[in-house]
Amino acid sequence: MIQDSAGRTMVRAAMKAPYLERDQEHLLALRWKDDNDQHALHSITVAHMRLVISMASKFRHYGLPLGDLIQEGHVGLLEAAARFEPEREVRFSTYATWWIRAAMQDYILRNWSIVRGGTSSAQKALFFNLRRLRARLANGTEPLSNATLYHEVSVALGVSEADVAMMDSRLSAPDSSLNAPLADDTGATERMDFLVSDDPLPDEVAGDTIDVERRSLWLKTALGALNARELRIIEERRLSEEGATLESLGETLGISKERVRQIEARAMEKLKVALVRQNPEFMAA
């Protein structure tokens, strides 16, 4: 039922508006398109508000105010009028139906749940057709399992069975507030209390990211103090995921593994000196 007076006035005006014959509709559409005649636009839209109200009533089971649905449908009607091409010899009602329905469906998807649903054409088809398909399939002689139902609907609408299952769960229960108590007594535990995350807090993540970037810059600068052989040994021994062995590096460089160990130790000492010299705060960090 439409609660506000503006909505009731709109319905009464729609019921009193005269029907348009094809020729009348065509002339009004030409005047609106060619001459931007606002009176012609008004005549077209008022005459088709019955269509808007009729379509709004088909969506009332989604629990949204009928007056809001009518207003959204009126927006779709105006969009149809703006895009209508009278020279195509198509009745305006036929063309406007798609725009009216699309406007109402978008409104329902935005407001039916606080959780934003899918807005793709496949997701819209699933949202608006799942109940109808479930009812039709349930009319068979044998009861359907959820798995069979999800498969049949996924084939009919061209979506995945996982999407069907998710939409079915959303449509079968209303939204629940995370602040709703789990018991009737005052001060009871809320649902939110069971959603505690062990992940670091956002400020901790940001701080760690900044520290990693700063230390990476320090290391890159300090590596400039090494010669080519020292740099290669440090990169392959300390900075690679695999971590080359002393033996393999010795064979590659043509030296003993003990010599590789000595060069690595010297390079590490040079890195420490360079880091402390260039960044006195390094020792504190």
Image: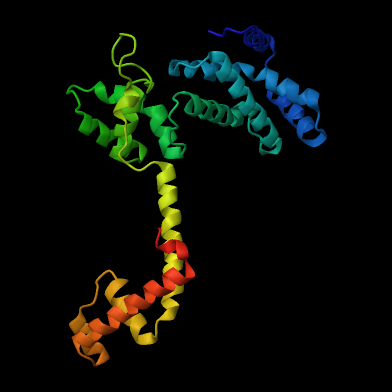
Q: For the point 82% across and 34% down, which residue is it? A: 35
Q: Nearer the viewer, residue 29 or 144?
A: 144
Residue 100 in picture, x, y percent from top left = 57, 27
Q: For the point 45% across and 26% down, which residue is it? A: 114
> How many marks do you count on the picture?
0
Q: Quadrant of the C terminus?
A: bottom left
Q: Residue 20: in sight, yes or no?
A: no
In the drawing, does residue 84 fall left or right of residue 193? right
As drawn, 255 above or below 51? below
Q: Nearer the viewer, residue 14 or 250?
A: 250
As drawn, 118 above or below 226? above
Q: Hey, which quadrant is residue 153 in on the image?
A: top left
As drawn, 201 above or below 9? below
Q: Hey, which quadrant is residue 168 in on the image?
A: top left
Q: Residue 158: in sight, yes or no?
A: yes
Residue, far bottom: 254
Q: For the point 63% across and 33% down, which residue is it? A: 90
In the drawing, does residue 264 fall left or right of residue 281? left
Residue 95 in picture, x, y percent from top left = 60, 31
Residue 51 in picture, x, y percent from top left = 59, 19
Specify how the rendered protein is coloured.
Answer: rainbow
Q: For the point 27% across and 75% down, which residue is it? A: 237
Residue 219 in picture, x, y percent from top left = 41, 69
In the drawing, does residue 134 fall left or right of residue 25? left
Q: Nearer the viewer, residue 220 or 137?
A: 220
As drawn, 26 above or below 53? below
